[in-house]
């Protein structure tokens, strides 16, 4: 039963993030509204309103059919155009930025709601149309219900203008990066709130008869149904120690975790455990903040590619990474989940700050090493982090090591003496802060002036 509940939770999460969720839900509501209005018409709704508000009642049958036919045809055209526009936007985003930002674009609830309004109005109109003077419907003409269809069509026209504006805004790289940044920031803040420090319960360090678990499938381990997994571990009276952080790629038959005692039927335990594990195909920052860093980095690298050559976007991406790295400093590299008795049951490592720092900045450094503005912005990133590293002295070697790599690339690829002096000037400022254990070297290589 718990396994079924876990699958339903994951299915719900998948459905609610689909582009078709809100349109389908709104269409069902409009279908129910159409049935309700037709029922109220049988109770004399239009007849009672005709005596008081005759302008709201459509009483001519030919006019009613013409209005409904026009609305149906117009809404179909609006819907087709809107869906076509969405597909073009997604294709452009995939080509200009990175395909992994597409889930973030289609998850905008406002755009989905507008598409749902179109489909709902169409469904409402068709249901009413087939009941106008039909043999099985007792009301000669549902006048007020038809008037509502006309009102919905007018509302759709207004939202069509909004839809064009919203889509044109969402495709801008500033909007995409900002959305990724805030989603990643919220996810990272949630991890920090749940963080209990670097202390690991003794049970994970004891010399127990540890038993490894092999992955029964291949894919990205994205999330757990924590409550169900805790119940399973309490049932077997074991603790679970993951070898890799969430978001890691698991290969079938390769060990991925261990439990602290030998179980009689490891295959059954592993099968039940994986019933509460979710494998997303999408890389969603709201599920794992690591993907937010990855998406921002990929957007910066794509902007620095020769085909696009947009250093302004890369600079903005570096600025967002600066804020996220400053926040990531407050998160430890160990993660322990506790049960209701405050006993540590699940342990897995976060992606270390050093690994995340290198994976995020190395591609930008590689593709931007020939641009002095990118080098300067990366050094400014380091400068900002040096202001925040005081409570975390263990991170100073990480910052120093990446800075040395950046200085080496800048020394090899920056020829202009003026640009080299700008870099050296900023390096002197960093050294004057006296935060790092060793001063950073200046650019020394001799350049030839023509």
Image: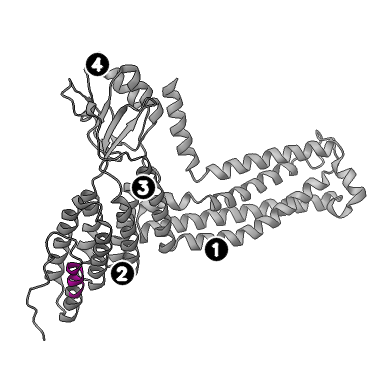
Q: Name the side, left or right, on which 237 lies relative to 226.
A: left
Q: Which residue is depicted at the point 14% across and 71% down?
A: 413
Position in image of residue 380 (x %, y %):
26, 67
- The residue labelled by disc 4 is 263
Give the CA distance from mark 3 to mark 4.
35 Å
- The residue labelled by disc 2 is 311
Position in image of residue 198 (x %, y %):
25, 40
Q: Secondary structure at mark 2?
A: helix
Position in image of residue 347 (x %, y %):
27, 32
Residue span colored magenta: 425-432
- The residue labelled by disc 3 is 188
Q: Name the side, left or right, on which 108 lies relative to 352.
A: right
Whichever of callouts 1 and 2 sits on the residue coming sooner in the sequence is 1
- The answer to whether 415 is drawn above or below residue 82 in the figure is below
* Quadrant of the frame with the N terminus: top left
* Label 3 Cα crowd, 10 Å radius (few <14 / some 14-19 / many 20+): many
Of tags 2 and 3, the one toward the viewer is 3
* Label 4 Cα crowd, 10 Å radius (few <14 / some 14-19 / many 20+): some
Q: Secondary structure at mark 4?
A: loop
Q: Which residue is depicted at the point 46% across and 32% down?
A: 9
Res. 438 visible in picture = yes
Magenta stretch contains residue 69: no
Q: Secondary structure at mark 3?
A: helix
How many numbered callouts? 4
Q: Quadrant of residue 277?
A: top left
Give the CA distance from mark 2 to mark 3.
27 Å
Give the CA distance from mark 4 to mark 2.
56 Å
- The residue labelled by disc 1 is 165
- The answer to whether 330 is drawn above or below residue 240 in the figure is below
Position in image of residue 399 (x %, y %):
19, 57
Whichever of callouts 4 and 2 sits on the residue coming sooner in the sequence is 4
Q: Which residue is depicted at the point 19% across and 29% down?
A: 205
């Amino acid at each position: 039963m718990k396994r079924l509940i876990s699958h339903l939770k994951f299915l719900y999460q998948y459905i609610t993030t689909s582009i078709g969720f809100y349109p389908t839900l709104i269409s069902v509501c409009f279908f129910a509204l159409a049935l309700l209005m037709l029922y109220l018409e049988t109770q004399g709704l239009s007849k009672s309103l005709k005596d008081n508000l005759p302008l709201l009642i459509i009483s001519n049958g030919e006019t009613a059919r013409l209005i409904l036919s026009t609305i149906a045809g117009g809404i179909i055209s609006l819907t087709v155009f809107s869906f076509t526009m969405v597909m073009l936007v997604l294709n452009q985003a995939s080509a200009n930025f990175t395909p992994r930002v597409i889930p973030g674009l289609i998850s905008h609830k406002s755009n989905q709601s507008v598409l749902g309004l179109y489909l709902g109005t169409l469904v409402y109109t068709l249901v009413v149309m087939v009941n106008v003077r039909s043999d099985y419907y007792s009301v000669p003409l549902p006048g007020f219900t038809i008037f509502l269809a006309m009102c919905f069509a007018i509302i759709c026209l207004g939202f069509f203008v909004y839809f064009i504006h919203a889509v044109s805004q969402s495709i801008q790289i500033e909007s995409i990066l900002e959305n990724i940044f805030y989603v990643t920031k919220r996810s990272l803040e949630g991890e920090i709130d749940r963080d209990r420090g670097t202390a690991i319960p003794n049970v994970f360090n004891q010399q127990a008869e540890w038993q490894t678990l092999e992955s029964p499938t291949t894919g990205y381990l994205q999330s757990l149904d924590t409550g169900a997994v805790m119940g399973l571990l309490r049932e077997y009276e074991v603790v679970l120690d993951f070898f890799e952080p969430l978001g890691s790629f698991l290969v079938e038959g390769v060990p991925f975790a261990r439990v602290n005692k030998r179980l009689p039927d490891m295959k059954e335990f592993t099968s039940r455990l994986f019933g509460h594990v979710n494998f997303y195909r999408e890389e969603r920052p709201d599920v794992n903040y690591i993907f937010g860093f990855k998406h921002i980095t990929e957007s910066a690298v794509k902007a620095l590619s020769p085909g696009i050559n947009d250093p302004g976007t890369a600079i903005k991406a570096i600025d967002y990474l600066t804020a996220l790295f400053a926040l990531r400093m407050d998160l430890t590299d160990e993660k322990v989940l506790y049960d209701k008795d405050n006993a540590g049951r699940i342990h897995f490592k976060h992606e270390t700050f050093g690994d995340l720092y290198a994976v995020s900045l190395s591609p930008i450094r590689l593709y931007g090493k020939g641009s002095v503005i990118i080098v300067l912005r990366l050094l400014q990133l380091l400068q900002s982090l040096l202001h925040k590293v005081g409570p975390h002295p263990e991170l100073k070697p990480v910052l120093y090591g990446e800075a040395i790599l950046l200085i080496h690339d800048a020394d090899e690829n920056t020829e202009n003496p003026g640009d080299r002096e700008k870099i050296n000037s900023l390096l002197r400022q960093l050294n004057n802060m006296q935060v790092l254990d060793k001063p950073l070297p200046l650019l020394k290589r001799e350049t030839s002036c023509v």
